[in-house]
Image (spheres, rainbow, N blue to C red):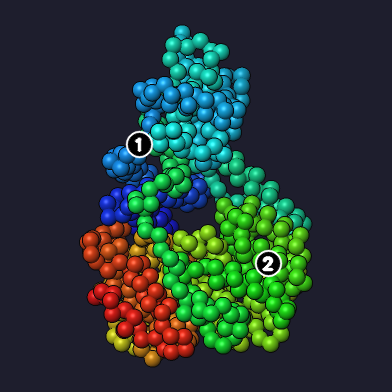
């Protein structure tokens, strides 16, 4: 791989392989392995809708060198799909040992009459009314098939074969539990009852074969300001549904006649990926498989107590005014963010709230609190990013709710995305700011590892306010001077220059220099070159990169990726050691888009106790010997040490925060004492 685009695409596939490794890992409870199959399937869907679609576009404008990359992607995808099918079979067998069975339509014929009749009744009452079969005839236009939806291709064999299409409605549950507690895919419920759909036709045999397509999900948004931003977004979202196909996944048993019809009507070309897979597709639904056995899943954890916020119930605004706080979820509760907003909504001293939203949960408690604050007469300003991929429609609905409640809503600085995670509470006696590495989303706050700093630091509050003023002026199309920052690293203004200076600072130290970066993506060429120069000068580096990684190997660089129970989502930059250590947390990955084309924020951790807290958490990750994989040039995904009893960073972090929560408030915590029961190499 000689260039960044190649590295990015293949590295993304490598990350998806790490997800698949979790499904293959027998150290993980079997129900969780099933969910990881669902996550892998969902990731691959997005990969083809976004990354592969981008490659296709480049090929179409004449960049034929991308064709070689497309061939490599196709080969690797087929290999991953074969591993997926084997992992699925292994997990189904393991579940059968636990008396959890999947029944196919052929199995239903051998069930007691009470079960088969129950399935027929379920189909007629709950499924049949939603089905819209389409007969494929020359005089009938081929229907527009929706990206990511599941279809059955029907073949009716007789004197002459007749073909039909059947969309499986997305609103139907994918898994049907029978009275004897077995599970049947909705696909097989339909297969079992095909006669009830096509009974008017004469045929000797009827068969159904699953397939789905992935379409180009990129939005072509022009810069015509004569059209409202929301209206424009609604228009292009409608266009997305008809994006050209990038992948066709079919049942390997599908007959040639039906297969050829699909290839022709969907205009599948040599540059598209066709996967000949199993009878089941859309396996992302495995993420929501109904689990009746808690003993086959991860053990439920109580949140680690925060030694200030979870003590005696007091006004959080007053507590933050006295000292900086750091919350890391899902080890600690995301509810601290929601509680702060709820308190601010009714606090008589609070005059206004400003916030950026990128992705929020359905029925978001965060949005509810903002609406409540607006109804209580607070001045509310919310910047909502409409270009948050696949969340656009939800964000439009959120904007409408906030507007109805009386909030002022803006949509960033197109074409730049506002990806920073900021909350500013303006109070008569002091301001409070919350700066986060991840979305203000209570759902992902239970699944993604992120941290939020709560502080009343005047400089940080003022600089956060400067960002909001910039966003408000942009919404009003007012010209403004380039904002200045002394503590925050803000893209696209000063973040790149500041990071270069920090790397240069360590480079000057030579062998005494140290850099630790924890990010989702590390692909920016200028940052990579600067890091390599520092490594050549003797600077030791620990790089923890979740997904895409483009650094060439060097003896002074140790790079790992950790994938475990939670999705690692924090971005943390550490420069130097000991008293000379500077620690930043951020919403920004080290990619060109994040540094030059997004509004992002990196914020310093300055309180000594909080610095120590971050350093301990990163020390645990660097020394993980249970879930860490080596990041190398070959994208091999070897485990650092695949063992039953190694240091598991996520478990050790939870233990550490549990102990930290027991520490006496106001007394500096001894990190060595708190980690004495954690095996750290």
Q: Quadrant of residue 461?
A: bottom right
Residue extending farthest to the top is 159
Dot 2, crowdedness within 10 Å: few (<14), some or many (≥20)? many
In the picture of the structure, the residue carrying the numbered disc 2 is 370
> Does residue 469 lie above or below 382 as drawn?
below
Instruction: Judge by depth and name the residue closer to the eye, 207 or 114.
Output: 114
Q: How many marks?
A: 2
On screen, 392 above or below 127? Answer: below
Question: Circle 2 sits in a helix, a strand or a loop, which is it?
Answer: helix
In the figure, is residue 312 to the left or right of 41?
A: right
Taking the spot 47% from the left edge, 76% from the top edge, the residue there is 306
Question: In this view of the protein, can residue 552 be seen by the observer?
Answer: no
The quarter of the picture where the C terminus appears is: bottom left
Residue at 29%, 85% in the rendered image: 511
Circle 2 or circle 1, nearest the eye: 1
Answer with left or right where residue 278 lies relative to residue 306. left
Specify which label sits upstream in the sequence, 2 or 1.
1
Give how far across and how far down residue 582 sits, in percent: 43, 85
Question: Which labelled disc corresponds to residue 101?
Answer: 1
Measuring from the top left, give residue 423's x and y in whole percent. Answer: 61, 73
Residue that sits furthest to the bottom in the current view: 579
Give the side of residue 3 with respect to residue 89, left or right: right
Residue displayed at 25% across by 74% down: 679
Q: Position of residue 654 (x, y in %)?
A: 38, 70
Instruction: Determine if residue 428 is in view.
Output: yes
- Crowding at mark 1 (Cα within 10 Å: few <14, some 14-19, many 20+): some
Q: Residue at x 34, y 50 (%)?
A: 296
Instruction: From the top left corner, tell me how far across and down residue 244 is, in percent.
Output: 55, 41
Asked if marks 2 and 1 touch (Cβ < 8 Å), the reply is: no
Q: Which mark is residue 409?
A: none
Pick the quarter of the image with the N terminus: bottom left
Mark-to-mark CA distance, 2 and 1? 46 Å
């Amino acid at each position: 791989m000689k260039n960044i685009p190649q590295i990015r695409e293949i590295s993304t596939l490598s990350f998806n392989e790490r997800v698949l490794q979790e499904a293959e890992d027998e150290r993980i409870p079997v129900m969780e392995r099933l969910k990881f199959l669902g996550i892998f399937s969902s990731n691959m869907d997005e990969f083809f809708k976004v990354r592969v679609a981008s490659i296709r576009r480049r090929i179409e404008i004449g960049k034929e060198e991308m064709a070689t990359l497309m061939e490599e992607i196709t080969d690797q995808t087929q290999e991953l799909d074969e591993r997926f099918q084997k992992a699925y079979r292994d997990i189904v067998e393991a579940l059968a040992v636990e008396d959890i069975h999947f029944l196919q339509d052929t199995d239903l014929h051998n069930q007691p009459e009470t079960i088969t009749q129950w399935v027929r009744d379920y189909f007629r009452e709950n499924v049949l009314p939603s089905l819209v079969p389409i007969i494929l005839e020359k005089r009938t236009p081929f229907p527009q098939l929706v990206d990511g939806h599941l279809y059955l291709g029907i073949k009716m064999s007789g004197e002459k074969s007749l073909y039909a299409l059947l969309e499986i409605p997305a609103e139907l549950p994918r898994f049907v539990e029978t009275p004897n507690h077995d599970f049947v895919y909705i696909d097989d419920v339909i297969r079992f009852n095909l006669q009830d759909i096509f009974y008017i036709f004469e045929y000797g045999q009827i068969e159904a074969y699953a397939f789905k397509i992935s379409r180009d999900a990129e939005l072509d948004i022009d810069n015509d300001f004569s059209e409202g931003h929301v209206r424009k977004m609604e228009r292009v979202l409608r266009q997305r549904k008809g994006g050209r196909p990038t992948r066709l996944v079919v049942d390997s048993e599908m007959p040639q006649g039906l297969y050829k019809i699909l290839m022709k009507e969907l205009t599948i070309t040599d540059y598209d990926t066709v996967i000949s897979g199993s009878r089941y597709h859309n396996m992302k639904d495995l993420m929501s498989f109904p689990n009746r056995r808690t003993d086959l899943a991860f053990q439920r954890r109580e949140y680690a107590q925060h030694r200030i916020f979870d003590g005696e119930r007091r006004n959080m605004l007053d507590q933050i005014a006295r000292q900086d706080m750091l919350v890391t979820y899902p080890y600690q509760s995301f509810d601290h963010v929601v509680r702060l907003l709820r308190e601010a909504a009714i606090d008589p001293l609070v005059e206004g709230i400003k916030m950026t939203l990128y992705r929020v949960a359905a029925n978001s408690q965060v949005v509810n609190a903002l609406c409540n604050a607006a109804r209580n007469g607070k001045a509310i300003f919310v910047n909502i990013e409409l270009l948050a991929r696949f969340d656009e429609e939800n964000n439009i609905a959120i904007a409408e709710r906030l507007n109805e409640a009386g909030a002022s809503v803006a949509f960033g600085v197109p074409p730049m995305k506002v990806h920073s995670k900021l909350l500013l509470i303006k109070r008569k006696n002091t301001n409070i700011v919350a700066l986060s590495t991840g979305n203000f989303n209570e759902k992902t706050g239970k699944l993604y590892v992120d941290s939020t700093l709560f502080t009343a630091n005047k400089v940080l509050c003022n600089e956060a306010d400067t960002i909001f003023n910039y966003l408000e002026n942009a919404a009003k199309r007012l010209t403004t001077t380039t904002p200045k920052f002394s503590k925050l690293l803000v893209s696209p203004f000063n973040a790149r220059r500041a990071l270069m200076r920090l790397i240069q600072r360590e480079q000057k130290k030579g062998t005494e220099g140290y850099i630790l970066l924890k990010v989702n993506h590390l692909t920016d060429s200028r940052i990579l070159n600067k890091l390599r120069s520092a490594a050549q000068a003797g600077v030791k580096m620990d790089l923890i990169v979740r997904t895409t990684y483009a650094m060439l190997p060097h003896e002074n660089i140790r790079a790992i990726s950790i994938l475990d129970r939670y999705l690692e989502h924090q971005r943390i930059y550490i420069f130097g050691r000991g008293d000379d250590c500077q620690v930043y947390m951020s919403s920004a990955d080290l990619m060109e888009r994040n540094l030059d084309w997004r509004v992002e924020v990196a914020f310093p951790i300055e309180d000594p106790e909080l610095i120590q807290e971050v350093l301990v958490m990163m020390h645990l990750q660097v020394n993980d010997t249970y879930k860490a994989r080596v990041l190398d040039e070959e994208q091999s995904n070897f485990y650092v040490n695949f063992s039953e009893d190694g240091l598991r960073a996520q478990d050790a972090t939870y233990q550490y925060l549990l102990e930290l929560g027991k520490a006496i408030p106001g007394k500096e915590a001894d990190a060595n004492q708190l980690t004495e029961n954690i095996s750290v190499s």
